[in-house]
Amino acid sequence: MNTAETNSSGKRHIEVNDENFRQQVLEASEPVLVDFWAAWCGPCRMMAPVVEELAGDYEGRAKVFKLDVDANPETAERYDITSIPTLLVFKNGQIAEKLVGVVSKKVLSATLAAHLNP
């Protein structure tokens, strides 16, 4: 089961975990952006508002999730996440794009938009 959380600014993001990753991400019919992050990671905290904005911008067209690598080591290991933040775009259950480090909203939005279903 996924959990929706709302931060102090009222923006919503969805957490996925080792247990629901397959169902929520790999079996999704629309493109999925997954932000691999950790609470102690400064650059991850810098990306959080960008990821949350994209979740709203792409609602109904793509899914946007966050996965805490410390709490979900199986999935992080499966996708060889060695640096965070790492942002993966999945389409049809496969990795379509990989971005590592802090990226602008413009770059991240264009990357996700390129994989939207027609």
Image: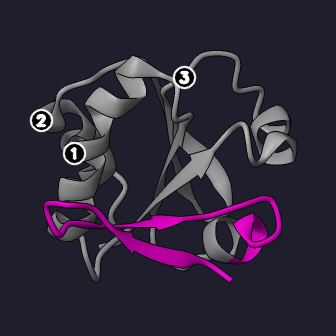
- Residue 25 forms part of the magenta stretch: no
Say which mark, if any, is on residue 49: 1
The answer to which image quadrant residue 118 occupies is: bottom left
Task: Report crowding for label 2: few under 14, some 14 to 19, many 20 or more residues within 10 A (C-alpha).
Answer: few
Query: Label 1 is placed on what type of residue?
Result: Pro
Residue shown at 17%/69% (left/top)? 10
The image shows residue 1 at horizontal and vertical percentages of 68, 83
Query: Label 3 is placed on what type of residue?
Result: Ile
Q: Which of 19 and 89 lies nearest the eye of the viewer?
A: 19
- Determine which residue is flagged by label 3: 84
| Marks 2 and 3, how far apart at CA | 19 Å
Say which mark, if any, is on residue 106: 2
Q: Which of 105 and 5 lies nearest the eye of the viewer?
A: 5
The image shows residue 57 at horizontal and vertical percentages of 15, 65
Question: On the rendered structure, is 42 left or right of 56?
Answer: right
The image shows residue 110 at horizontal and vertical percentages of 20, 42
Position of residue 22 relative to residue 74, above or below, is below
Label 3 secondary element? loop
Closer to the observer: label 2 or label 3? 3
Say which mark, if any, is on residue 110: none
| Marks 3 and 1, how far apart at CA | 16 Å
Query: Label 2 is placed on what type of residue?
Result: Lys
| Marks 2 and 1, how far apart at CA | 13 Å
Label 2 secondary element? helix
- Residue 21 forms part of the magenta stretch: yes
Residue shown at 17%/56% (left/top)? 53
Residue numbers of the magenta segment: 1-23
Residue shown at 54%/22% (left/top)? 84
